[in-house]
Image: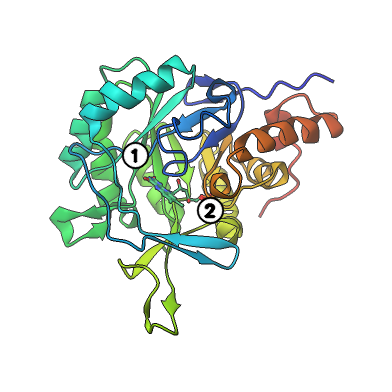
Amino acid sequence: MTVDLSVDVAGVRLPTPVMAASGCFGFGRELSGFVDLAGLGAVVTKSVSLEPRRGRPTPRMAETPSGMLNAIGLQNPGVEAYCERELPFLADAGARVVTSIVGHTPAEFAQVAARLAREDAVDLLEVNLSCPNVDHRGEVFATSPEAATEVIAAVKAVAGQPVLAKLTADVTDIVAVARAVVEAGADGLVCINTLLGMAVDVRARRPKLAAVTGGLSGPAIRPVAVRCTWQVATALPEVPVIGTGGITTAEDAAEFLLAGATAVAVGTGNFADPEATTAVTTGLRELLAAGGLGSVPELTATFKGGA
Ligand SMILES: Cc1cc2nc3c(=O)[nH]c(=O)nc-3n(C[C@H](O)[C@H](O)[C@H](O)COP(=O)(O)O)c2cc1C
């Protein structure tokens, strides 16, 4: 049977619902030898800031059970170099491009979005709200509905592309933040960024990461990410949700789609297997065909959950 994997995310048609998650695929160049970038739903880029950033000191990664901790610190070449050097590569490869943006203040997020508004090769913006707000004692934007609203409103005022807001599960009520950013104009939501974690090297008697704490990702966080996706998609059924957290197989991806996601993104899975996005896409096509389902919405409609 023919399976149509294409999905619509905030008015942008993607050939498949399987994207590469931010920070786990660089700017596509490194992985292009393994994956046909045009065959992906989209490439979500490493988060891009106004000025170049060098990132955090090493060690920046530590393996943990069924996952990993990272404190890379948003290393990137800055928006100008991104537009000059990285974006043309992605465009030439025929990829749909979701540019992840980051800033120290709402105004800085807006400056990055305004620069990207001139770039036709960018299909969507993803706003990385999991970073400290320098105006508010380093409070992470995504943990406050008010701070997240300020960023999304500032970005929407200048954006040339639809805007996705990336949420964190490190909050008591993720739906409250989701509602706030949608009211501020977000066209879609991404659930979830890494969870804040820490690991200690008992022999050396110090934290495994130089930054002490870091973001936990991989299969260890999948049930949390699926729960967030389900809560947000149920509360805001009109808003597309991109599910991400611990996806390594087609079944993992289907979990998110059944829980209400419109599309998914594979992050840490790319480190273990650079062809993970292709394997998930192929497997999803087979999974749908085996269930007699012709499209992703047909799969989503079969979900028997509820509360
Ligand atoms: C090494 C690494 C770097 C990341 N960098 C970013 C980033 O720059 N911006 C962002 O929004 N998310 C970043 N993330 C978070 C991922 O995009 C994703 O939301 C999270 O890791 C959960 O998915 P996963 O379990 O499939 O990795 C990063 C994750 C990892 C592991």
- Pointer 2: what residue? 228
* Callouts 1 and 2 close, C-beta under 8 Å: no
Residue 127 is tagged as 1
Give SS at disc 2.
Answer: helix
Mark toward the start of the polypeptide (1 vs 2): 1
The residue sitting at 28% across, 29% down in the picture is 82
Q: Is residue 68 above or below residue 256?
A: below
In which quarter of the view is residue 98 placed? top left
Q: In this image, 169 relative to 82: left or right?
A: right
Q: In this image, 144 relative to 123: left or right?
A: left
Task: Please name the colour scheme applied to the rendered image.
Answer: rainbow
The residue sitting at 44% across, 51% down in the picture is 193
Kind of residue at disc 2? Cys
The residue sitting at 37% across, 60% down in the picture is 60
Whole-percent x, y for residue 109 in the image:
22, 38
Is disc 2's CB within 8 Å of ligand 1? Answer: no
In which quarter of the view is residue 58 placed? bottom left
Whole-percent x, y for residue 25 in the image:
46, 39
The residue closer to the viewer here, 64 or 98, is 64
Q: Is residue 170 visible?
A: no
Kind of residue at disc 1? Val
The residue sitting at 55% across, 61% down in the picture is 67
The residue closer to the viewer here, 238 or 77, is 77
Q: Badge 1: how crowded within 10 Å, few (<14), some, or many (20+)?
A: many
Mark 1 to mark 2: distance in Å?
Answer: 18 Å
Q: Is residue 128 visible?
A: yes
In which quarter of the view is residue 22 placed? top left
Q: Badge 2: how crowded within 10 Å, few (<14), some, or many (20+)?
A: many
Which tag is nearer the camera, tag 1 or tag 2?
1
Whole-percent x, y for residue 160 in the image:
30, 20
Whole-percent x, y for residue 42 in the image:
51, 28
Give SS at disc 1.
Answer: strand
